[in-house]
Image (cartoon, grey):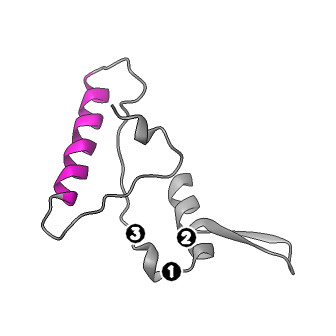
Amino acid sequence: MFDVFCIRFGATLVGPAMGGKSTIYRILAKIMTSLRLKGSPDPIYQPVVFEILNPKCIRMGELYGEFNAMTQEWTDGLASTIMRK
């Protein structure tokens, strides 16, 4: 059922305003966290932490990270910084 969350970065909810998107992810986060804390042996249920980003307001390199060919340096983006945290 939750196979979509066995991915590296995250998921996107799309829908109309007032369609329940925020309610859906908050309820799912509470359920998955609650199941882990109640001792579910299934590793799919983990404490959930979510960060809300608006990827349209930043460049792709700022979101995922980027390599500078001149300096040979990698700079983490928001996504990798959040995942490390």
Task: Write down the residue under mark 1.
Answer: 58
> Residue type at mark 2?
Leu
Q: Quadrant of residue 42?
A: top left
Q: Are marks 3 and 2 in contact (CB under 8 Å)?
A: yes
Numbered circles on residues, count: 3
Q: Is residue 73 magenta?
A: no
- Label of residue 53 in the image: 3
Mark 2 nearby-residue class (10 Å; few <14, some 14–19, many ≥20): some
Q: Quadrant of residue 30?
A: top left
- Label of residue 63 in the image: 2
Q: Please give left or right for residue 3 compared with residue 62 in the image.
A: left
Instruction: List x then y, in percent, for residue 5.
Output: 42, 41
- The residue positioned farthest toward the left in the image shown: 18
State how far apart marks 1 and 2 are (Cα). Answer: 7 Å
State how far apart marks 3 and 2 are (Cα). Answer: 9 Å
In the picture shown, does residue 36 fall above or below 23? above
Q: Please give left or right for residue 25 compared with residue 68 in the image.
A: left
Q: Secondary structure at mark 3?
A: loop
Instruction: List x then y, in percent, for residue 85.
Output: 51, 54
Which quadrant holds the N terminus? top left
- Badge 1 or badge 3: first in the primary sequence: 3
Q: Secondary structure at mark 2?
A: helix
State how far apart marks 1 and 3 are (Cα). Answer: 10 Å
Q: Are marks 1 and 2 in contact (CB under 8 Å)?
A: yes
> Residue type at mark 1?
Ile
Q: Quadrant of residue 72?
A: bottom right
> Residue type at mark 3?
Leu
Chain part drawn in magenta:
21-38
- The residue positioned farthest toward the top in the image shown: 41
- Badge 3 or badge 2: first in the primary sequence: 3
